[in-house]
Structures are given as structure tokens and as C-alpha cells.
Amino acid sequence: MPFVVPARHDPGMTDPTPQRHHAIDYVELAVTDLDRSKRFYAEAFGWEFTDYGPGYAGFRDARGGAAEAGGLALADAVRTGGGPLVLLFSTDLDATLEAVTRAGGRVVDGPYEFPGGRRFHFTDPDGTELGVWSER
């Protein structure tokens, strides 16, 4: 299903969000059930969504900005076992881990310590793996 990425700002904004050269600008996650995935990410991380038709929802993350950080794209299947790993930041890793599992995610690694803090990996209801890290 071809899809054109929506504008990077809400229609009511006067200025689009400035992009940074060579910075990660937008993350798109393939999902097989758009409504279930929206519920999961809203419950686990507080993301807010803008629907762009039956097969796509843009999301704003917990930073509270108006700019979209990415989107959920309806797909027939989700690729597993490769590709980049998206890492989210948390100020309270244990509370985030609890929210992920309560929302239906499955922890697949950790939490564990690394030189910059602690982190864990989880899969969402479609099996997409993401990570969350914290400084402590």
C-alpha cells in the first residue's frame, strides 16, 4: 500500500518544525492492526495520534511537541530479525518497563546495565522490537 509521509506539522501551526541536518527525523513502524498498535503505544508511552486514512497514523511522542516523530503504517506482515533498532529514552526505566508489559508488550532482553545507564528491549503486539534506555 503506497503512502506519502504527511506534513511534518499540524495544519494549525504557523511554522513547521525545523529539521536538523543528518538527524533522525521520522520513524515509521509497520503494524498489522492499527487500532491495537495505537492503544499499545498510547498506553505504554503516552503517544498521541493523527489518523491519515485507514492505513496510517502519525504519532507525536511524549516530548509534547506538535511535530510528528513518526507513524504507524498498516502492513500485511511485520519484518523481524533485522533493520535498525529504535531506542526510546525514559527517566524511569522501571516504570516504563511496567507500562510496556501492562500494555501488552513482551520484554525480550534486560533490563541490563551498560556504560551509559540501563536499558531493555521489548516487542510490541506485532513483534516489532524496540529498546528503552535510561541514565540510571
Image (cartoon, rainbow, N blue to C red):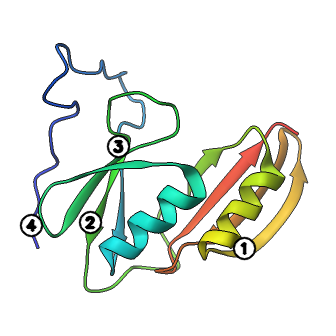
**Amino acid at the residue labelled 4:** Pro
Quarter of the rendering containing residue 67: top left
Query: Does residue 115 appear to the left or right of 56 in the view shown?
Result: right
Decide: marks 2, 3 in contact (CB < 8 A)? no
Quick one: quadrant of the N terminus? bottom left
Quick one: quadrant of the C terminus? top right
On the image, numbered disc 2 is attached to which residue?
73
On the image, numbered disc 4 is attached to which residue?
2
**Amino acid at the residue labelled 3:** Tyr
Q: Earlier in the sequence, mark 4 or mark 3?
A: 4
Q: How far apart are marks 2 and 3 (CA)?
A: 13 Å
On the image, numbered disc 1 is attached to which residue?
107
On the image, numbered disc 3 is attached to which residue?
26
Q: Residue at x 40, y 79 (%)?
A: 79
**Amino acid at the residue labelled 2:** Ala
Q: Which of marks 2 and 3 is nearer the N terminus?
A: 3
Q: What element carries label 2?
A: strand
Q: Is mark 3 on a helix, strand or loop?
A: loop
Classify 10 Å Cα crowding around label 4: few (below 14), some (14-19), many (20 and above).
few
Q: What percent of the width, then of the height, locates residue 10?
A: 20, 31
Q: Which of marks 2 and 1 is nearer the N terminus?
A: 2
Q: Which of marks 3 and 1 is nearer the N terminus?
A: 3
Reply above or below: 20 against 55.
above
